[in-house]
Image: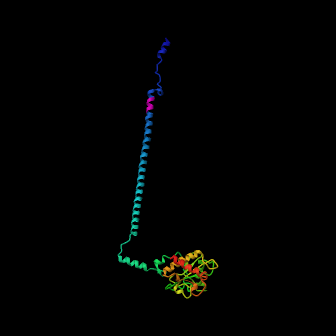
Amino acid sequence: MTQHTANHNVRQYPDVINVKRNPYLVDYEEQRRLRRTAGQTGGRAASRAVQRARRRRIVRRQRFAIGLWALCILLLSVAFLAKNAKVSAARHERPSVPAEWEKDTTAQSSSETVQGLPAAVFAGHPQWTEDFLTPNEYSRPGDALESVKNIFVHYTANPGTSAAQNRSYFEQQKDTHERSVSSHFIIGYEGEIIQCVPLDEIAYAVQTRNTDSVSIECCYLAQDGSFTQETYDSLIGLLAWLTDAYGLETDDILRHYDCGGKKCPLYYTEHPDAWERLKEDVAGAK
């Protein structure tokens, strides 16, 4: 009897619900977590999209600025080239002038002279180096050469010396006062030509004929006074030009020997046949 009563008084409690294992609650919590995660992911994606859009705008602005700068440079270049072309065309365009002005200009140009010769004639001279002596009373007095009737050929009388050395000897006379000596031209044994005195001034080369003649000194190496081929060739060319420039004949070419009897140039005083051949070569070079 007692036992029955005890069993009757025991309360029956329901089983405890395990929340963690409840499938309904698990699904709910999982859904909340997924929604929260999705919200965070969506926010980051939106932020990245905003940043990308901002970068695109910046790039577009930079490209526009670069394009505008390049266009300005191109336009400036085109304007500069067009201006230069217009200036160049203006320079090359010959202005129209009255016919009488052209005649006057032609007359003026034909009357121009260089070293006493017409400019056009002088321009055709053979190649030489102008190295004029310093004006002085011993080698370049500066007296005018009014006319040219003859051309004299000389030799330097000191074998192995160059054209520059002989020119220096002429120059030294202004200081040493040893002699009055010079020539219009010196031809070296390698064929180089130095002009020492302008053609409209006298040189001290042939004592009695300085006032109406042009003189040429020739360097040499051989003891007999003969010229090297280079010297000879340059001499022929210079004589041909001078005789044409002054309207002379080959017979107007003289040796220093022909005026005063001095054995100069030595080889051609001892070999008159060679002198005649030289004049023939000058005639052939005209």
Residue 56 screen position, x and y as percent: 42, 48
Question: Is 130 located above or below residue 67 in the figure?
Answer: below
* Secondary structure predominantly adopted by residues drawn in magenta: helix
Residue 195 screen position, x and y as percent: 54, 79
* Colouring used for the render: rainbow
Nearer the observer, 203 or 148: 148
Residue sticking out furthest to the front: 273
Please report the residue visible at 59 percent of the width from the left and 74 percent of the height from the top. 229
* Residue extent of the magenta highlight: 26-31
Q: In the drawing, does residue 142 fall left or right of residue 48?
A: right
- Decide whether residue 25 is among the magenta residues: no
Residue 64 screen position, x and y as percent: 40, 53
Which quadrant holds residue 262? Answer: bottom right
Which quadrant holds residue 73? Answer: bottom left
Please report the residue visible at 44 percent of the width from the left and 29 percent of the height from the top. 27
Residue sticking out furthest to the right: 223
Nearer the observer, 26 or 68: 68
Question: Is 30 located above or below residue 156 in the figure?
Answer: above
Residue 145 screen position, x and y as percent: 50, 85
Nearer the observer, 11 or 87: 87
Residue sticking out furthest to the top: 1
- Decide whether residue 28 is among the magenta residues: yes
